[in-house]
Structure formats: structure tokens, C-alpha cells
Amino acid sequence: MLDGKGDVVPGVQRSEAAPRVVIVGGGFGGLYAARALGGAALAVTVVDRTNHHVFQPLLYQVATASLSPSQIAYPIRGVLRRQKNTRVHLAEVTAVDVAGQKVLLRDGELPYDYLVLAAGARHSYLGHPEWEPFAPGLKTLDDALDIRGRILVAFERAERESDPERRRALLTFVVVGGGPTGVELAGAIGEIACKVMTSDFRAIDTRETRTILVEVGPRILPTFPEALAEKAERSLEGLCVEVRTGEAVTRMEPGAAWIGGNRIASGTVLWAAGVAPSPLARSLGVPLDRAGRVVVNADLTIPGHPEVFVIGDLAACNDPTGKPLPGLAPVAIQQGEHAARAIVRATRGEARETFRYRDRGTMATVGRAAAVVTFGRLRLSGYPAWLLWCFIHILWLIGFRNRFLVMIEWAWAYLRSERSARLITRETAPSGPSPGPG
Amino acid sequence: MLDGKGDVVPGVQRSEAAPRVVIVGGGFGGLYAARALGGAALAVTVVDRTNHHVFQPLLYQVATASLSPSQIAYPIRGVLRRQKNTRVHLAEVTAVDVAGQKVLLRDGELPYDYLVLAAGARHSYLGHPEWEPFAPGLKTLDDALDIRGRILVAFERAERESDPERRRALLTFVVVGGGPTGVELAGAIGEIACKVMTSDFRAIDTRETRTILVEVGPRILPTFPEALAEKAERSLEGLCVEVRTGEAVTRMEPGAAWIGGNRIASGTVLWAAGVAPSPLARSLGVPLDRAGRVVVNADLTIPGHPEVFVIGDLAACNDPTGKPLPGLAPVAIQQGEHAARAIVRATRGEARETFRYRDRGTMATVGRAAAVVTFGRLRLSGYPAWLLWCFIHILWLIGFRNRFLVMIEWAWAYLRSERSARLITRETAPSGPSPGPG
């Protein structure tokens, strides 16, 4: 064995007598909470329905086949393997029994003394759940692999399609929602179509691909300063993306989406228009905000239950000025660390502290080497913003994977428009007839 | 765009007037044939049911989660993108109409002037097709992802299983077949269980995992010199693998395999006991050998059809001494290059040449850093053999991916027992109830 680490650490038990902390969700919030509890005399259990943590900010890169799953996802067991007081539970949580102090699983239950609920959000179809089969959203690694399969198979079908109209539809991609996810998705699709794959096909010219980004609001990236949103829009146009603001998707049907009154024949419609908190929020029996998030106390606990913490996208939390905190990784990370601290203090009988978010800015990328970043007063766009974006994202990865390797992999993927991830497996191919079982 | 290459090469058409060459299969044989025809005045079409070439010798590494798919598979379009005379067709071939000179697809047909049939082999259940659902084989990337899901989920279930008997069954892996694939699979499972994952779990000690390698013959690696097979067997034992030679699997049922008269309760049985040529062989209407492979002429064509070449695992081809050639990558590669040369010569009205295989030796690895290699008179085992094995496999990758990057990735994966590939996605999780939808 060249890697001795595995040998010296036996799979020891943790003390079941210690106070039990259950953390629901292996996202940024849950994982940072778990890591902050590593040294404590607690019996920590992390429950997730998948066995991996996903680096969400780069999920769109997997969906567009620029990166492979293992470059942005990491087994939760791997992250926590050295924490002898921590257990990882691969299971689906169906509800929380706050009165009984236990988490209900699809196949069992987990009693707790302290609960950290970090179940996050799924995408929401804004009252049109029937649209989901036509327009998949992007929240999990499975979503990303499904979307990748749809995009790649669309090009494969177009290459073999003799009817010009059907071919045009196969080469038309509609992305619904002009937030960071929609902008990144549309930008990345435009990029592989107009830049990366131009010489891969013979019957089609991928540069004729039409990518339409639909945003109901007056402009894309509403949470960003206007000047930066404009820069992003120009970069998108440089990637042959049609940006259509002030327009809404009104109808969806197989093979087409209606934008306003116009029917757009499209083989691939992707949804990035909204998220909804996990339904677990409702099972807590406490007030939710209009979006369905749990309204938490200043210390991130829920009314009447100082042992229950809700963090991340699931929590409705305001900054001191009363402004709601955005659903971003840094917020979830800081809340996770706060919850962990609060639990340790509680076991010591110390008083609670108010959670304060330290804003470190927001970022988005638009395809390769084009990004917008706002850091308090500092505002960057284009290449420098993208470099900063990479640097900071790699910083966030500390402890998840070796930063140096990730840097090589990503740099490589960006510099050479990595093609090796463009694999269609039976698993990633969308259901329904495809050019072949491949 | 930092990678300008994509821009300068438009997606041009090739001349449809030129003689049409259809290559069925994107494995080593088909791909090397296609690349050898790159410069020729021919209209080449490569058909495969998947969009990627798989580096088969490392498939077991994906199945055991040491490498990720994109490290050993590469889009066929990517390999051939600069060959303007070559088209890639994602489709399933159902039969060959030799008289009509066309390849029949599930959804169309491809006429040809020259055919290179390199459809390879699938695993064979030696007269027990009903065993397939219980014991998946390893031939494609999908197979590997399915097997990976089964192995990882087995450990996850064991971690949550309270009944000691069921837990023992979940931690028992049976690999059927002592050839290179079975040896590599068993070795890699033993390795992740006894070395890599030892500190990942709390309720189970993965070193109690039982891996049983069953070989009906008197020894493992029958095609290798006895001394090397013995070394391999010792390395396997060092990885807690039980090697049981001279024993056969007699029965399979859900959750158990019968070895001779003994029922072995096992959650995961894997099949590596035999391969069968693609059923396309039968559609040629020419004599097949006992194994079902096409008996080819000295120039690799079939009787009565000098325009049809059969290569790789699908061809029954003897060396000058009459000894049948093994089903190895180097054979397929040399045959593909020979078929390409023969086609070019035929278009020039030049005479056929006899195919001669230049033996460059055989290799197998048993887990990390243990390998056996035979090169004519040279025989190596252990670490030096493994280094040579890596080096030669990387040489084979020329043109497929940047060798330097692959070397970094593999070296990294080997040195640190790469964990990041240990992802269970809905796609990789086996069908049937699992601890969660993850």
C-alpha cells in the first residue's frame, strides 16, 4: 500500500452515551457544521440521501460536460472519515418529529438531542409542476448527468436528422430563468456549441445552435449591480446566446416551449427559474415565510425549540438591518459553523449568541473566462473576476479535496475545453427513444 | 476562448462520392482502423452504440471506484474530430447484409463499399443466461458504473444493517472467473475493503470483508506462466482475497451463489468467467468457430467477400504456427491497422497482404502496485511489472488524451487511493430497494 493512512486508523466506534447531534443534509451548511463538531464529545450523525457532497457552484459545468462528477463531488464519508465521533447515514429523511426529538427516515428513525436541519432547496416550477418532465432543473449530481445526457444526445440526433426543421429544433436550447444558474447554463451551452464542438460534427454546424435565455424580470442577474449584469449580457451574446428579458414561459409541450405568445420548437428546455425549500420545513410545525422557508430566531433555532437549528437555503434569516440573507454557500457555511458553536456552548451551559453574517461578496461566471464579482465596494468583471472566482472557489474546497489537484484539473479543463467528460452513458442518456442504447 | 483550436476548423462535409468505408465498433480495433484511414480519399463512417471509446484494461478501476469514467473513456468524436473524411454515427447495428453491402441499424441502414466489423464481445454466462441479473459482467462503462453502485451500496447497507448474518452477506463478494478481469476485480475489491476504506465506516470494519475468487480451472491466470500466476495468487491473498481454484459456481439465487455444494450468502456476485462474440457474427452467414467467432482469411476478410474485414475479439485468427490469437488490445490494434492498409491498397488495385501479429507480451495487474508481465523471454512481477504496465498503457493512449494529464491523474489515483470517484448517483445505484434514492 502506497497510501498508509488507510491502514493506521481502524474503524472505531464513537461513544453512544454522548449527546446525540443529527445533521440533516451534506451540503455546505451541514458539512461545515459536522466538521466544526469534529473534536467535541458528541455523537454526531450526518444524514443525506446521497453519499456525496456536491460543489453546487460548478454543477452547471457537469451538466454541460466540461467537468466530470468526481471533479465537483466528494463522498461525505471521505470528508468526515477522520472524525471518530461522526457517523454518516445514507438515508432519506421523510419528516422531523420535533416533540419526540427524532428524525423520521423512509426506513427507520434517528433520535437526537440537537438537530441541525440543512436540507436545502429543490427547484420550484412556480405553480407549474407539470412542466418538470419537459424542463429539468439543476440541483443535484443526478440532475446534472440527466441534463448532460439531454444536451449531448440532442447534438447526436441533430447530426443524424435529415429534416431541416426537426434539426433546427434539436439545435435550439431554451434556458428559463436569468439568475446565476440560468446565466451560467446558457453561457456554457453557447460555449460548447460555438467554440468547443465546432469540428466534432459533419452534417451540422454546431455554431448554428440557438440558445435562448428567458428572464421574466427587466434584466438578468437581478441580484447583481446593473453594470455587471450588462457586461454578463454582452458576454452571453458573444457566445451566441439570445437573452430575452421581460418575457415569460407561458406553456410547455413535448418538443416546444411557449415564450409569451410564440411557440419555440426546442428539443431541450432547462429550468433555472426558481427554488423551493425542502418540504421538511413544514414538518417542524413552526411559521414559514412566503417562500416556505423556516423563520428562525437570531441564534438560528426555531421558536420553542432551542435544540433545533435550521440553516442554509431552508432558513429565512435576516441580517441586522432586516434584509434577508441570500441562498449562497458562504451563508450556509457560516450558519453551519454558528450552529456547531452554539451546540458546544449549550452542552457547557453557556449562553446563546446571535448569528451575524460576514458578507464576502457574490459571484457568477458566464462561460469560460467571463465572470462578474462584487466584493463590498470592489466590482470586477471578465477575466480578472473569473480568476478571483476560481481562486475563492478553490479556497472553499479546503479539506474536501487536495486543492493542488483540483486546481490542475480545473485549469486543464478550462484551458483545453476538456472534452473527456463528454460521455453519454445509459445512465446519463435521457429516457425515451435515443439514437441508440448508448 | 483560450482554446482557439475549436474556432479554426469549421464542420466541413466529406466527399460522399469517395468509396464508403463503414467501421462497426469504436473499440481499439475500430478506432485504430479509422485513424489509419484519416488521410485517405474515402468516406469513412464509424458506428458505435455508445459515444465513447473505453480503455478496457482499466474498466475494473471504474467498477471499483478508483478511477472515474472520464479518466478511461473518451468521446469517439473527440478522437476523430480532425479527420474530415470521417463521420461518427451513434446508432445500434442489428445485422450486416453482406449481399446488399449494407449495415442494418435499429433505425436505418448504412451502405458500404468496404466494411470493418469490430463489434467485439460481451460476457457469456456459459449456458446460464438466467444468471445475468444476479451476477453482472464487466464489458462497458455502463457495466462498470452498475458494478460500482452495487459494491458501494453493499458497504452502505452493511453499515446500517443490525442483523450480523445479513451484514456478513453484504460484506461478502464473489467474483466468478480467474482470468485477468476476475483477478483484477477481486484484487481491487480486496484493496478498497482492506486498505482504502478502513476508516470510512463506524458500525462495520471493512477489513472483515470477504472476497472470494472462484476459478473452475486448476489455477488463476491460465494464459500466464505458472510462476507468475502463483505470485498473483499470493498478492491476492495479501489483499484478503480467498482464491478457490478447481471449483465452479453451480447455482445462483437472490443474495447467494452456490460454489460446488456450498451456498455462499453474498450481496454482490460479479461475473468474469467468459466472453461471447457479438451476435453480429452470425448475420454474416460465414463459418464461425466453436466460440462463435468469425473464421477469417489470412488477410482478415471473410470467405467470398474481400470487402468485409472482421477484426478484434470478433475474429478467429491464428498466428502462422496455427495458434489462435488472444483477445487482447494489441491484437485488435494491429488488425485494425492491417484492415485499413488493405482497404487503401485495394482502392489502388494492389494485392492483399497476410496479417502477421507482432506479439508484444501480455500483462495483468492485481490491485495497486502488483502486476505480472510477460514480454517474450522477459518476465516481471510486482512493482516493476506494474510500472511497465502503466507505462505501456499510457503509450496506448497516444492521441486519445493528453498523456501527461492522464499520467498525473493515474499516478494521483494510485498514490493516494483516490476516493473522489466513490460516488453513488441514481444512475450508478443498482435497481431495487436501496438505502435511499441517492
Image: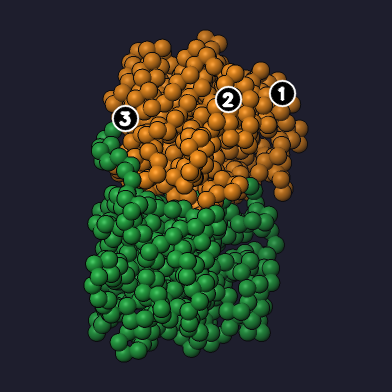
Chain colours: A green, B orange
> Which residue is identified by label 1?
B286
User: Which of the two residues, B224 or B343, is positioned nearer the viewer here?
Assistant: B224
User: Which of the two residues, A139 or A23, is positioned nearer the viewer here?
Assistant: A23
Q: Is residue A322 left or right of residue B339?
A: left
Vertical order, A202 against B278 (above or below)? below
Q: Is residue A269 left or right of residue B370?
A: right
Q: Is residue A188 visible?
A: no
For residue A350, which quarter of the picture? bottom left
Which of the chains bears the disc numbered 3? B
Q: Is residue A321 visible?
A: yes
Whether callout 1 and callout 3 share a subunit is answered yes
For label 2, count other residues whose C-alpha is less than 10 Å away and answer few (under 14), some (14-19) or many (20+): some
Q: Tag on residue B369? A: 3
Q: Is residue A302 left or right of residue B250?
A: left
Q: Residue at x 31, y 43 (%)?
A: A12
> Which residue is identified by label 2?
B263
Residue type highlighted by circle 2: Arg
The x and y percentages for residue B320 are 52, 12
Which of the chains bears the disc numbered 1? B
Q: Earlier in the sequence, mark 1 or mark 2?
A: 2
For residue A338, which quarter of the picture? bottom left
Which of the chains bears the disc numbered 2? B
Q: Earlier in the sequence, mark 3 or mark 2?
A: 2
Alpha carbon distance from label 3 to label 2: 33 Å
